[in-house]
Structure formats: C-alpha cells, structure tokens
Amino acid sequence: MAKLEVVALSADRWDDFAALFGRQGACYGCWCTYFRLSPKQRKANSSEDNKAFIHARIEAGPPPGLLGYAEGEAVAWMQIGPRADVPQFNNAGRVSAPLPDASVEDSSVWAISCFFTRSAKRGQGLSHDMVAAGIDYARENGARVLEACPMDRAKQSKSVGLFVGSTRVFEKAGFAQVALRKDGRPLMRLPL
C-alpha cells in the first residue's frame, strides 16, 4: 500500500471523519469518546450523543487527532494531543495514568490514545505511518514528551480491540516503556 497522506483533523474534514467512522460510529458507537467522557456519561450516551460530542470538539479546535488518507479516502484515524484533552486517559486507576515527571497540567506532555482504521485496511501497517506522522505533529506543536499505553497482544492483528495501538508499533517508532501497571499494557514514552 502507498504511504498515507496524514493531516490534522480540522472542522472542514468532518465529513471525511464521519465517513471513516461509518453509521455505527466506529468501535460500537464510541466516536472516539472513550478517553474523553466519564464511564457514567458514556453509558448514558447513545451513539448519536457521542457523535454530537466529538463533532462539537472538532468544531471547537484545536485538532484532536490526525486522519490518514489513501487515494483521497480517509482510511485511518489517530487521537493525539495534550494529555489534558483526554481526561479519562489520566485517571489514577488507569494503566495510562501519568507519571509525576509528566503531569497533565503540562501542555507539552502529549498522548496518542486511540486508533481506528477502516476494516479493509487493517493489518497493512498503517498505524506505523500514523505514529510517525504523530511524532512530527507533536514536535511541530510544542510537545516535549509523547506517551501511549498500547497493548502487547490481541486475538488477531486486525482486531478492533487494538484501538490503543500495538506495543510493537510504538517500539519500532522509538518509544520505551516507562511503567507497567498491568501485564501486556505498558505506558510508553518518546522524549521529543
């Protein structure tokens, strides 16, 4: 597959994002709100509520992530930005909770928290291109640290359960483990 064209998700790209996520809203109607809304709010929300929430977030800016295009069609998404923008990623009880040297209040501490790839394109290495573009994007926007909390294994390489990314992809991009609070879910970091 040809290398992706990766761009920031701005409001004028909403239609492409919505087309990628489809009628169901990717990952069972999540619309990439998993790390943005409390569990109670997510449970109360419908897929349409989540869609309206992320649409408003995209409209408000700054871009909450990156879209990857192949042959003019959005085929991949990666949520990336300051940790403060994804509050549920920072909860003390989560495996992704921040370490003392990279606090949520520090706007130069960024996180890659979610991926979504069109099902027909999964297993083709697109997440490598997305992470590489994300590293550049984070640097260009003042990040000093980029973190992720991927998983080591999934039942299959094309699993939607890999929405947090694969440890192997982050290792190949130069990230190193800085904490392990649950087997198979390392907190990884790349100093920028």
Image (cartoon, helix red, strand yellow):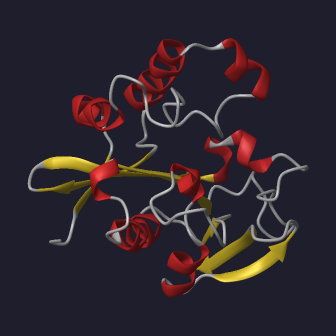
- Depicted 157 relative to depicted 177: above or below: above
Q: Quadrant of the C terminus?
A: bottom right
The structure residue drawn at horizontal position 75% and vertical position 72%, both measured from the top left corner, is 186
Which quadrant of the structure image shows residue 96? bottom right
How many numbered marks appear? 0
Which quadrant of the structure image shows residue 110? bottom right
Q: Is residue 153 left or right of residue 16?
A: right
The structure residue drawn at horizontal position 68% and vertical position 74%, both measured from the top left corner, is 188
Which quadrant of the structure image shows residue 16? top left
Residue 175 can be seen, yes or no: yes
Rendered location of residue 167, percent (x, y): 61, 75
Residue 108 can be seen, yes or no: no
Rendered location of residue 113, percent (x, y): 59, 54
The structure residue drawn at horizontal position 43% and vertical position 40%, both measured from the top left corner, is 62
Rendered location of residue 72, percent (x, y): 10, 50
Q: Is residue 70 left or right of residue 54?
A: left
Rendered location of residue 3, percent (x, y): 19, 72
Comparing 98 with 123, the one in front is: 123
- In this view, the residue farthest toward the left is 71
